[in-house]
Structures are given as structure tokens and as C-alpha cells.
């Protein structure tokens, strides 16, 4: 690497000496001036091809040249064909052929020259006629052969480079302006097949400006791939190692001009600028072959004053053929032969797409088709990113050599037969075959499909969920000929998007199910070559239950399922036991219990089971279960509250407990009770909860299996607590025990006095507080004809019936089944006595005192 950097610095030093000249000629680097035309064709082994089809010359080739100058040409041009054999070995005199373009025979018939043995390069000079012209040209070449060797190589390189750029420009113009997606897609295809990198800044502009940016011919910013710059610029604007890397791909560096990536264009003007005599200066011409015409472009206007301009034209290098390294873009891609426009995506050889060197290509099928030829003609198409099937006339052999005055067309040729691409009976494949100039070559072998796919079905493992975008996998006997997939959603026909799947003959389809509900749907698979679409039935479901786990303990008849959307669970089976959902459902847990008649399960701690959870829509989800140790278990042996014999209101039902009195419980456990255990007390609806522990003194062990609990509802829950409450044992690291019903808590009003009139038909008056807690009141325990208490009562007195036997019965609002007795001594209603008016003496006394 150090040597490379040293070489780069040395090259930079040499090139920097010519920066001034190069900078002055920057505008001349654009080859946009039309030059004269020269017609060329090559004959090898009695076969003839136009120059556009010839990538290389070989010793013994017969090169026919015909200067195509207009009849009105006023300046006589001398054409000199020179063959070179290296930078340090000047060519002999007889390797220079003088051709007088003004000669009538030359104008009509052209001239044929033979490539001599040991020749490596070939140049053509067009020089205005002057004294000693031929001798001057020959002496210049023999005197400095290395300059002309380099010029020959660089002219070829520049021609290949410019051909790729112009192919890109011509192809991108086929995209309708304003279509940003098509522009980007085809630009990517062209960049891949032509090994170019379009200027990314173009795609950052407005849509209407992108097209003009990409098709701006002659702009140095058009293609940002390191091409089109001088050696000086390459060395002075980037690391020297970058130049060495770029140079390694060029013919001058020994990699061959047919490399998949052509190197940077060099400054041809600088190379030849210093080579001139009093008579001549040399200007390069890039050739753009079309059939047998070398269409020349110049970067400097020719001069007919001394020193006159000599146009230097490069012919193909003289070397062995290097066939194009074509490869498939995607080895898994299968090409459908039933498509109207069949394109085989290939890459790796830009010259296949930018020149005519690869010609008369065919796709040789592994087995003869039922109808049609076994060899299908192909045509390189950079716009479509590969080789496309072409419709051409029957093929015939390479044309024989014609008389020198004749013309030759790019007619079809027949590649030499090779071994079959695939044994008959196997999958259909095709091999790319054709000619690279005069030589046959064989390209990549690609898998093919020539019949529509059969057996289409959905194979996705996960259910499709309605109400969101989902994905589906479709498989068949072959998916390459898939055209479109139709889908009817909410009365609207949609075309679905899809891409090839990871498995063979599988595709991944995107389904827009946001506006559909659960149920059956149908997809219509349209294929090339199929007379009608193939229906594929699918089913969508609601958002599925997500099961996170199942808790099952030894000795339990209940299992707890955790997850989401558990309302869809219909039942659960473990072995032959069938659990059904119970009322214990929350947002993330669901209790499932065995039927009362079913036997209790006899599982062991650590036993591994499989639970099959059936959903309401028919899906069955499997969840692994590991049997856990028994949960803490308690039973209530007794419960009591303080006795107040003098209280006027007493609860009749022993299952009801007063809120305003502490509760004492005695609990029993079949297993020893650890001191880390807590007792959780909560309402039936789980809206209120309190935990009692040993540290607070609320729990006291009587023995290992007996626990005394003290609980003050009013202190724990506040004055709004009422209704059923329950309790359970909780131990750290274990699921809580089962809830055990404790009691129904009720709030009692306060009764202070009962006043009754002597007339039994009239109601009594009850005086007290919180009388709104009474729902109704009657003189009998059955509350046969009760008096109803208004819900909006706010007074401290209440009209009640006369007591029977000195007792009334109350139905409480906190528990309509809770009956309380009210015993108060009956007081007579107070009589209102009107006071007497004061006497005169009293009045006088009052006045005097004031």
C-alpha cells in the first residue's frame, strides 16, 4: 500500500506540471463536434462483420476502410493506418499504410489492410495534405510510440465511456417527464446495467426538474461516477489510492478494455498537446460506431493553418477476445416466458448494453417447447434492465465476405451449438448464448416458467386480522407468471401489492384490511397465459386473544389465564378436563373452572401439561402449563364484633356486620402460616382493598395453623364502604389464595328519640342522624306494609308508623336483604303551650332596669 501511495504522489507530481494546459483546455474535454465519417468492416476466417460488432482485432484480420467524405470536400485528407507494437518498440515502416482519400478508386471501393502479426494497437490518422505529410506522420509515431500507444488505449476507453453515458441519456428520455417513480425506477435499472451512478442531487429537485437534470447532455455533473475528469483532477481532488483503484480497471493498467467497469476518461488533449511539428498538431477523435460507420466526434476544432490538425482515430485493440462477464441480477429470480414483454435481469457487463459487440443473442431452452423454437432471440435493453425477448426473422449463418465495394448489414447469426442447458424432464431453464464479435460465448443460465402456476393457496401460519393491514403468503406450482392479485374490500376492487417470498414459488401479499370485518374473503389471482383468474378463499378474524400464560396449582379446580382479549376464550382443555370461563374476568386475567360434577384434578407439582384454549371464532391456541405448588388457603372459623346491648338498632342477620365496629376473625390454614403472609380484604367489585400484616398488629398467630385477625372497616375504607367484602391469603412469590366471603358491611343510622301521638292512626316521629340510610320501615319483621324513606331525605326527623310491641323494623339501603330492629321508648308528642302576656309591674320593672 505504501508503494501505491508513493506511486500516486509521483504521478501527481508529473501531472501537476501540465495542470495549466489541462485547465486551459477544460472546455475542450467535451467531444461534441462532429467529425468526418469512416466506414470500416472486418473480415476474419472468411466471415465479415461491421466495425460496430467488432470488440477486438486479431492478427490476420482484413480491415476494410472507406473514407465517407462529401463530394464537396475542399481539403484533401491523407488517411494513414498505423499499427503499433508497444511503448518501447517502434513499428516498422511497412506497418504504415498510405491511403489517398481523394483517389476515385478509394472513394468507390475503399481499401483493405491486413493486421500484421505482433501488432497490439491500430490507429487511423486523417491529415490535411501537405509536403512530406506521410513521412512526417510516420516519423512522429516511430519517434514517440509510447504516446500513441497511450492515445490508442485512451481513445478506446473514452469511446466506451461516452457510449455508456449516451446510452443512459437516450434511454432515460423514454420516461414520460413528470413521472418521478418511473424516472427513479428506470434510472436505477440503467445505472445497474451500465455500471453508472446518476447524480443523486437530481432526485432532490422538484419532480418537473428531475428529468431535465438527468438528461442535461454535456454536463460534467450529469453522471457522478468518476468519469469525464482529467488525471490531474483525479489526483488533486482525492486520495492517490482512489486513482490507483480506478486505474486498475482500465485497459492501460492491464485489466483489459472489456472490464465490467470502464476506467476514468483521461485528458486526451493533454497527451497529444505536446506532440506537434511545424506542420502538424494532433487532436483526438472519439468513434461512435453504428453498423460499419465510425461516427467521429472531436473536442477541438480542426485547424487548416500551420500547424495543421491531424485527427487521431483509435481502432479496436489487437488482442484475444474477452467475453462479457454477464451474470444474473438475482439467482432466485424466475423469468416468465408468457409475459408480453419478457426481460431477463442481468448485469456485470455494461458494454453488452452500450455497444453492439454482443449480438445475435438467443435464450436456449433446456427442453424443446410444445410449440415454437427452442432458441428464443434476445436483445440487450438497458431501459428494461436486462435481455428482452425479441421478435425477429429466422436466423442464418455469419455472412460471407463480400466484395470490397459492397455493404454488409447486421443480419442475424447462428451461435455454435453447445451442450444442453438442463437434462430433459427437469425444471425449465434457459442459457444465454450468442456472439461477442466473431466469437461465440455462453452467458448465465436462468430458471424459466412457461405455464401458469397451479394449486394456489394461502399458507400463512398466523391468522389474518380484520381492521388493520396484514400480510399473507400464497404458494403455487409456479409464481413467476403472476400478473395481478385482485381483492374486493367494502365493494371496491383493489390491486394488491406483493413481492417474492423467501421460499420457492411463494409470494408475500400485503392485505389492506382496515375497512373489513371478520369473515370470509376471496382473492383473484391473475396470471399471464391464464384465461381466467384463480380464486383463493381466505378468512379474517378479529384481534386474537394473546395468551401469556396459565396459572394452575395443585389441588385447584380453577386455572387463571393471563393475556389480552380474553373475552374471546370459549373453553380450555387439559388432558380430559374441560375448563369453562367463570365470572372472574378482568382486562388481563380470566378464571376458568371445572364443572361442579367433574372430579378434582390430581396433578403434581412441576408437572408439565399442554392447555388447548378454544376461541369463539374456532381458533385453538396451545399454551404450555407447569403445575405450581398449592396456593395459600384459609377458612373462617369465627367472626365477631363488640356487643352493645343498649344500642337501639341491632342487625337481625348474622351475615351482616356494622361498618362502624371492628371485626375480629379466627382463620384456619391447612399448611403452616408463615409470618410473611398477609391477609387482603376487599370489596366484591375490587374497587377497595386493604392488606393486613403482622407488623401492624392486625395479624396474630395463635398457632402454626390458626390466625387471629383484627380489622376496622371504617378506618381501612372510610365512611363510603358498604356491601359484600371478602378476604384471601397472600404469600410473596406465589399466586394469591382463593377469595373467601367475609360478610356484608352495612352502615346504620343513629336513633335518638321516638315520639308518638296518642292517636294510633297518626304517625310517630323518629329523631336521629343519617336517617337516609334507611330504605323503608314497618312495625313487623316481614315489612308487610312499609313506609318508604325518600332518597333525598336530609332532615333529622322521619315520620314512622307506630311500633308494635315497642319495636320497629328497618330495611337498610346498603343491603336490601339486611333487616335491623329499632327499640326505643315511646315518648308522647310535646304539646305546644302559649305563654301569658307580662303584667304592668313587670313592664315597669323592665323599663326601669333599662
Image: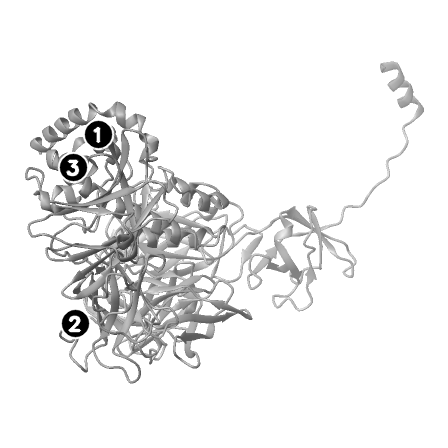
User: Along the polypeptide, which appears first: circle 1 or circle 3?
Assistant: 3
- For the residues carrying marks 1 and 2, which lies nearer the camera in this image? 1
Residue 511, how many percent across, how many down?
43, 65
The answer, for residue 611, to whether it is visible in the render is yes
- For the residues carrying marks 1 and 3, which lies nearer the camera in this image? 3
Check disc 3: other Cα within 10 Å, few if <14, some if 14-19, many if 20+.
few
- For the residues carrying marks 3 and 2, which lies nearer the camera in this image? 3
User: Along the polypeptide, which appears first: circle 1 or circle 2?
Assistant: 1
The answer, for residue 442, to whether it is visible in the render is no
Secondary structure at numbered mark 2: loop
> Which image quarter: residue 6?
top left
Q: In the picture shown, does residue 715 fall above or below 636?
A: above
Residue 287 vs residue 681, the one in the foreground: 287
User: Along the polypeptide, which appears first: circle 3 or circle 2?
Assistant: 3
Give the residue number, with chain letter if any, for mark 1.
Answer: 276
Quarter occupied by the N terminus:
top left
Secondary structure at numbered mark 1: loop
Label 1 – label 2 distance at C-alpha: 49 Å
**Total of numbered circles in the picture?**
3
Label 3 – label 2 distance at C-alpha: 46 Å
Q: Give the residue drawn at x 43%, y 52%.
A: 173
> Which image quarter: residue 109?
bottom left
Give the residue number, with chain letter if any, for mark 3.
Answer: 135
Check disc 2: other Cα within 10 Å, few if <14, some if 14-19, many if 20+.
few
State left or right for residue 744 relative to residue 697.
right
Label 1 – label 3 distance at C-alpha: 14 Å
Q: In the picture shown, does residue 834 fall above or below 593?
A: above
Amino acid at each position: 500500500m505504501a508503494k501505491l501511495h508513493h506511486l500516486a504522489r509521483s504521478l501527481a507530481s508529473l501531472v501537476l506540471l501540465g495542470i495549466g494546459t489541462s485547465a486551459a483546455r477544460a472546455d475542450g474535454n467535451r467531444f461534441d463536434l462532429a467529425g468526418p465519417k469512416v466506414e470500416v468492416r472486418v473480415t476474419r476466417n472468411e466471415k465479415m462483420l461491421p466495425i460496430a460488432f467488432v470488440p477486438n482485432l486479431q492478427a490476420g484480420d482484413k480491415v476494410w476502410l472507406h473514407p465517407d467524405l462529401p463530394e464537396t470536400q475542399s481539403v484533401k485528407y491523407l488517411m494513414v493506418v498505423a499499427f503499433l507494437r508497444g511503448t518501447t518498440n517502434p513499428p516498422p515502416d511497412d506497418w504504415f499504410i498510405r491511403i489517398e482519400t481523394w483517389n476515385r478508386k478509394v472513394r468507390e471501393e475503399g481499401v483493405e489492410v491486413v493486421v500484421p502479426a505482433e501488432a497490439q494497437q491500430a490507429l487511423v490518422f486523417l491529415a490535411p495534405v501537405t509536403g512530406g505529410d506521410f513521412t512526417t506522420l510516420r516519423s512522429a509515431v516511430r519517434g514517440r510510440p509510447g504516446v500513441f500507444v497511450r492515445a490508442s488505449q485512451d481513445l478506446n476507453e473514452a469511446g466506451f465511456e461516452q457510449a455508456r453515458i449516451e446510452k443512459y441519456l437516450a434511454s432515460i428520455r423514454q420516461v414520460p417527464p413528470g413521472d418521478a417513480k418511473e424516472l427513479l425506477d428506470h434510472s436505477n435499472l440503467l445505472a445497474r446495467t451500465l455500471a453508472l451512478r446518476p447524480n443523486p442531487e437530481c432526485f432532490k429537485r422538484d419532480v418537473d426538474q428531475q428529468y431535465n437534470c438527468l438528461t442535461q447532455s454535456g454536463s460534467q455533473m450529469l453522471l457522478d461516477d468518476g468519469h469525464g475528469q482529467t488525471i490531474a483532477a483525479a489526483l488533486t481532488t482525492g486520495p492517490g489510492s482512489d486513482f490507483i483503484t480506478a486505474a486498475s480497471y482500465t485497459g492501460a493498467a492491464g485489466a483489459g478494455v472489456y472490464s465490467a467497469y470502464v476506467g476514468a476518461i483521461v485528458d486526451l488533449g493533454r497527451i497529444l498537446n505536446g506532440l506537434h511539428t511545424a506542420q502538424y498538431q494532433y487532436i483526438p477523435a472519439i468513434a461512435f460506431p453504428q453498423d460499419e460507420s465510425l461516427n467521429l466526434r472531436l473536442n477541438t476544432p480542426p485547424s487548416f493553418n500551420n500547424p495543421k490538425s491531424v485527427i487521431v482515430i483509435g481502432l479496436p485493440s489487437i488482442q484475444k477476445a474477452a467475453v462479457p462477464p454477464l451474470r444474473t441480477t438475482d439467482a432466485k429470480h424466475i423469468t416468465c416466458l408468457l409475459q408480453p414483454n419478457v426481460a431477463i435481469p442481468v448485469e456485470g457487463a455494461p458494454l453488452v448494453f452500450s455497444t453492439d459487440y454482443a449480438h445475435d443473442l438467443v435464450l436456449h431452452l433446456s427442453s424443446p417447447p410444445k410449440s415454437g423454437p427452442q432458441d428464443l432471440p434476445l436483445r440487450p435493453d438497458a431501459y428494461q434492465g436486462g435481455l428482452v425477448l425479441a421478435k425477429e426473422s429466422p436466423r442464418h449463418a455469419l455472412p460471407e465476405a463480400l466484395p470490397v465495394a459492397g455493404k454488409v448489414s447486421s443480419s442475424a447469426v447462428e451461435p455454435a451449438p453447445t451442450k444442453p442447458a438442463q437434462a430433459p424432464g427437469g425444471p425449465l431453464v434457459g442459457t444465454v448464448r450468442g456472439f461477442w464479435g466473431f466469437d461465440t460465448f455462453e452467458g448465465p443460465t436462468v430458471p424459466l416458467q412457461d405455464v401458469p402456476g397451479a394449486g394456489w393457496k394461502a399458507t400463512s401460519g398466523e391468522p389474518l386480522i380484520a381492521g388493520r393491514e396484514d400480510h399473507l403468503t400464497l404458494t403455487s406450482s409456479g409464481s413467476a407468471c403472476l400478473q395481478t392479485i385482485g381483492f374486493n374490500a367494502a365493494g371496491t376492487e383493489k390491486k394488491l401489492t406483493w413481492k417474492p417470498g423467501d421460499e420457492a414459488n411463494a409470494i408475500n401479499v400485503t392485505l389492506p384490511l382496515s375497512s373489513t370485518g371478520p369473515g370470509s374473503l376471496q382473492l383473484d389471482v391473475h396470471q399471464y397465459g391464464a384465461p381466467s383468474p384463480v380464486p383463493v378463499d381466505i378468512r379474517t378474524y378479529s384481534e386474537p386473544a394473546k395468551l401469556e400464560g396459565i396459572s394452575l396449582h395443585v389441588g385447584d379446580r380453577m386455572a387463571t389465564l393471563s393475556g389480552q382479549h380474553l373475552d374471546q376464550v370459549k373453553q380450555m382443555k387439559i388432558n380430559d378436563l374441560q375448563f369453562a370461563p367463570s365470572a372472574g374476568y378482568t382486562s388481563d386475567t380470566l378464571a376458568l373452572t371445572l364443572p361442579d360434577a367433574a372430579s378434582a384434578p390430581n396433578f403434581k407439582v412441576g408437572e408439565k401439561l399442554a392447555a388447548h384454549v378454544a376461541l369463539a371464532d374456532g381458533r385453538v391456541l396451545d399454551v404450555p402449563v407447569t403445575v405450581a405448588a398449592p396456593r395459600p388457603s384459609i377458612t373462617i372459623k369465627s367472626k365477631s364484633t363488640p356487643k352493645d346491648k343498649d344500642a337501639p338498632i341491632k342487625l337481625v342477620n348474622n351475615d351482616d356486620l356494622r361498618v362502624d365496629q371492628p371485626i375480629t376473625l379466627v382463620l384456619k390454614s391447612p399448611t403452616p402460616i408463615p409470618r410473611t403472609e398477609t391477609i387482603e380484604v376487599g370489596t366484591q367489585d375490587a374497587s377497595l382493598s386493604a392488606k393486613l400484616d403482622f407488623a401492624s398488629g392486625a395479624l396474630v398467630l395463635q398457632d402454626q395453623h390458626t390466625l387471629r385477625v383484627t380489622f376496622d372497616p371504617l378506618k381501612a375504607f372510610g365512611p363510603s364502604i358498604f356491601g359484600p367484602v371478602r378476604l384471601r391469603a397472600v404469600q410473596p412469590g406465589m399466586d394469591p389464595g382463593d377469595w373467601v366471603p367475609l360478610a356484608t358491611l352495612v352502615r346504620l343510622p343513629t336513633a335518638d328519640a321516638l315520639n308518638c301521638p296518642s292517636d294510633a292512626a297518626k304517625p310517630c316521629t323518629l329523631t336521629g342522624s343519617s336517617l337516609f340510610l334507611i330504605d323503608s320501615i314497618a312495625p313487623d319483621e316481614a315489612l308487610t306494609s312499609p313506609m318508604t324513606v325518600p332518597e333525598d331525605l336530609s332532615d333529622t326527623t322521619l315520620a314512622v308508623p307506630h311500633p308494635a310491641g315497642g319495636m320497629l323494623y328497618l330495611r337498610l339501603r346498603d343491603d336490601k336483604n339486611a333487616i335491623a330492629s329499632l327499640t326505643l321508648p315511646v315518648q308522647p308528642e310535646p304539646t305546644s303551650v302559649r305563654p301569658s302576656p307580662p303584667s304592668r309591674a313587670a313592664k315597669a320593672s323592665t323599663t326601669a332596669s333599662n
